[in-house]
Amino acid sequence: MTQAWSVRDARERTQTSRHRELLDAAARVFGELGYEGTTVAAITAEAGVSRATLYVYFASKDEIFHALAERVRDEFLAAQEFEATDPDPSAALRVTIHAYAAAVLAAGPLLRLIDQRGAVDSRVGALAAEINERPLRRFTRYLDRQAAAGAIAATASHRVVAETIGYALTHGMLARRGASPAARAVFLDDMVRVSRSLLGLPTGPGE
């Protein structure tokens, strides 16, 4: 019974605004100082809370970073919820590209840190593999279904198309983190046009 209550309490803690605020503060500190440079003290100072408050939610710096990696994973997967978007592949592609770009922008330097930390921490490594691979697999399966329905005619294998779009979006948005919203919007419009071309969809003024 004690274990059941402990699990429930842990789940309830993750659903509080304080938990989200601590993760947001930790993301800023990790992004600025890197993994090795980040301390619990730096995170509590950024969040404006005591160590005692932080330890209600997280047992260690490692646990905070793991929770951040889980959040990044979930945000990337949420950006790939194709069935929740417009059934028209052209419209769905635009929605998905913008959602995926927003996930990249939100994650920022954490993406690189997750990959680096994953090399020495197997739990983070498993999450890094999910972040890198699961969205690609999901996108590839979506393209397979659209091709079977005759809605697209990709210029290369669906996996290669998914990798090309995903890589360009990720690196393009990271390179433009400091750019203006207008500059990022131009990049995303270009990405939509390139992606539609790769999928054999209309790319002209009437798209």
Image: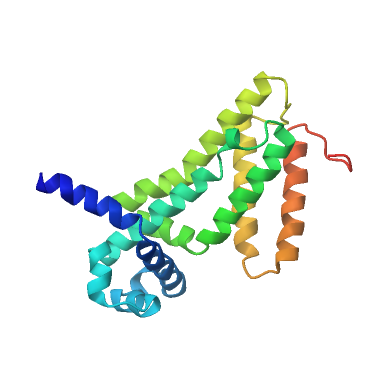
Q: In which quadrant is the N terminus drawn?
A: top left
Which colouring convention does the figure follow?
rainbow
- The spot of residue 195 in percent (x, y) is 72, 41
- Residue under the image location 41 percent in, 49 percent down: 128
83 horizontally vs 21: left or right: right
Give 42 or 197, whichever is nearer the viewer: 42
Residue 120 in sight in this render: no
Residue occupying the point 72% across, 20% down: 150
- Count the marks: how many? 0
Q: Residue furthest left?
A: 1
Q: Position of residue 101 (x, y in %)?
A: 61, 53
Q: Is residue 51 above or below residue 123?
A: below
Rendered view: 178 above or below 165: below
The structure residue drawn at horizontal position 65% and vertical position 57%, both measured from the top left corner, is 172
| Frontmost residue, 188 versus 55 | 55
Q: Position of residue 13 (x, y in %)?
A: 29, 57
Relative to 65, say whether 130 is above or below: above
* Viewer-nearest residue: 76 or 37: 76
Quadrant of the drawing holding the C terminus: top right
Residue 157 shows in this picture: yes
Q: Residue 61: where, in percent of width, then height?
A: 29, 66
Asked which quadrant contains residue 192, the reply is top right
